[in-house]
């Protein structure tokens, strides 16, 4: 292995000159992030389990939307606060069975395994992870997914799609440009990154049923240029979008519904015993913050409270809980709309609970057990000392699973590790973090 300083210089030299990392900063490290064999096996097994879970969520939604009995509440809950057009769009028969072709969970690396904090079907970071895998792979590191795993996975999942990106999502354009160029270099079909602001649907000459990778949010359609024209073409079958136009699949509510007692029979019938056991191991216990009163003889399972106001009086240890907005909102991504109970004073925690309860008719919140990431040491490059310094850190892992077109088979393209300072509670990309591929 080359000397530490030599590896840093090689990594620096590999940085793209065309702004792949525009407005992004992080700390460098001479080493990729190493995962224990047990964690590698768990991540490999999670891909098929999460694909099965998404299929089960999709099926449950439509069964409950068509139901008048015990399950009807599920679709009503997941659709809550969404405009009628968005609900109708998600239920369109043309893409009733369609599922996302890339799955990215956010995994908190704990002392005993991983905890799924989010499940993203429209993720950023694909180009970044592809570049990291190639760069550290060229240094001889056995990166998970392989040096070209992200590019090959994208090509398998999206064999012909151009990428349609909105102005609001333009921060991700450089990495999608990088992905397109990487595909072209490997002759894995040439495609383009198009902007909704410039690509008028009527001016595009495509054969019927042309597919686009959708890089815009459904909650933001009012700000997506020509969105109504794009949606009309989709409804007419003239274009197809992936991920499918299903806002209901992009809700964090599903992670709480996985633990809802009334749905345990459904999950047991919809998932294999192996997948069910793995998801129970990785999805934190969760609840939907619904202000509707319980009967006086009932309690919220696991919390043993009868009213949400009782949650405000929890002590510091009992407040190892996280409140987060479910999804159809500008606050439903990143660290926005997230409140960590034991990291807040009592008055602020009580205010967050009141906010969640008031938000329920428009944007429901979920409450989950908070699992702290374990502390690990990893070398961070110190520019002043010109050497690597072992740094206490907490880690978020983002594996990218691609589903090859026409199949249900998941392929691990790579795993992005966000290695944050140990004093951070919410783990995300930041200038003090290291962004690394996993080996």
Image (cartoon, grey):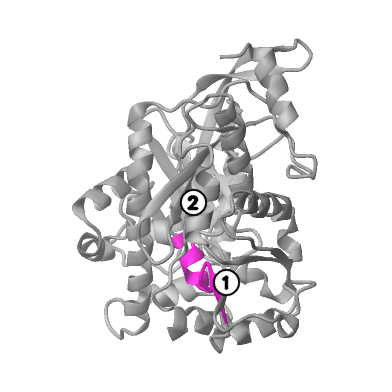
- Specify few, some or many for label 2: CA neighbours under 10 Å numbering under 14, 14-19, or 20 or more: many
Hey, which quadrant is residue 189 in on the image? bottom right
Q: In front of the other: label 1 or label 2?
A: 2
Q: Residue at 27%, 60% (x, y): give it.
A: 261
Q: Nearer the viewer, residue 357 or 181?
A: 181
Taking the spot 33% from the left edge, 30% from the top edge, the residue there is 38
Q: CA distance from mark 1 to mark 2?
A: 37 Å
Label 1 environment density (alpha carbons within 10 Å; few <14, some 14–19, many ≥20): few
Which segment did they paint magenta? 239-253
From the viewer's perspective, is residue 201 above or below residue 168?
Answer: below
Residue under numbered circle 1: 362
Q: Position of residue 434 (x, y in %)?
A: 63, 30
**Frontmost residue, 325 versus 158:** 158
Rendered location of residue 420, percent (x, y): 60, 30
Q: From the image, which quarter does the N terminus lie in?
A: top right
Residue 359 locus on image (x, y percent):
57, 66
Residue at which label 2 appears = 153
Residue closer to the observer: 79 or 245: 245
- Please indicate, yes or no, whether residue 72 appears anywhere in the rendered image: no
């Amino acid at each position: 292995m080359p000397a530490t300083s030599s590896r840093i210089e090689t990594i620096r030299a590999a940085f793209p000159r065309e702004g792949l990392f525009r407005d992004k900063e992080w700390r460098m490290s001479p080493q990729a992030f190493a995962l224990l064999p047990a964690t590698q096996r768990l991540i490999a097994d999670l891909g098929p389990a999460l694909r099965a879970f998404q299929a089960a969520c999709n099926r449950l939604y439509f069964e409950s939307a068509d139901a008048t009995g015990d399950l009807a509440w599920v679709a009503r809950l997941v659709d809550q606060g969404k405009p009628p057009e968005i609900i109708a769009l998600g239920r369109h028969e043309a893409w009733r069975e369609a599922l996302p072709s890339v799955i990215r969970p956010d995994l908190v690396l704990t002392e005993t395994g991983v905890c799924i904090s989010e499940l993203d079907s429209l993720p950023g970071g694909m180009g970044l992870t592809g570049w990291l895998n190639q760069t550290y792979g060229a240094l001889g590191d056995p990166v998970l997914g392989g040096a070209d795993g992200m590019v090959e996975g994208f090509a398998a999942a999206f064999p012909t799609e151009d990428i349609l990106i909105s102005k609001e999502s333009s921060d991700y354009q450089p990495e999608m440009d990088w992905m397109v160029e990487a595909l072209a270099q490997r002759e894995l079909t040439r495609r383009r990154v198009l902007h909704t602001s410039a690509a008028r649907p009527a001016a595009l000459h495509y054969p019927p049923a042309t597919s686009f990778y959708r890089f815009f949010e459904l909650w933001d359609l009012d700000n997506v240029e020509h969105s109504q024209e794009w949606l009309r073409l989709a409804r007419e079958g003239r274009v197809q979008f992936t991920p499918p136009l299903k806002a209901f699949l992009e809700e964090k509510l599903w992670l709480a519904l996985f633990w809802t007692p009334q749905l345990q029979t459904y999950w047991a019938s919809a998932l294999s015993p192996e997948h069910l056991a793995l998801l129970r191991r990785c999805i934190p216990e969760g609840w939907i913050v619904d202000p509707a009163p319980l009967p006086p003889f009932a309690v919220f399972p696991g919390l043993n409270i009868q009213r949400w106001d009782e949650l405000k009086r929890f002590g510091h240890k009992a407040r190892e809980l996280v409140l987060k907005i479910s999804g159809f909102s500008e606050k439903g991504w990143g660290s926005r709309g997230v409140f960590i109970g034991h990291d807040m004073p009592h008055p602020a925690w009580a205010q967050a609970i009141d906010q969640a309860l008031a938000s329920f008719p428009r944007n429901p919140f979920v409450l989950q057990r908070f699992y702290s990431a374990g502390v690990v040491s990893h070398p961070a490059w110190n520019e002043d000392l010109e050497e690597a310094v072992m740094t206490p850190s907490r880690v978020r892992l983002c594996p990218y699973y691609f589903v090859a077109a026409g199949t249900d088979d998941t392929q691990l393209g790579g795993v992005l590790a966000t290695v944050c300072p140990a004093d951070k509670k919410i783990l995300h990309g930041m200038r003090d973090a290291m962004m690394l591929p996993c080996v």
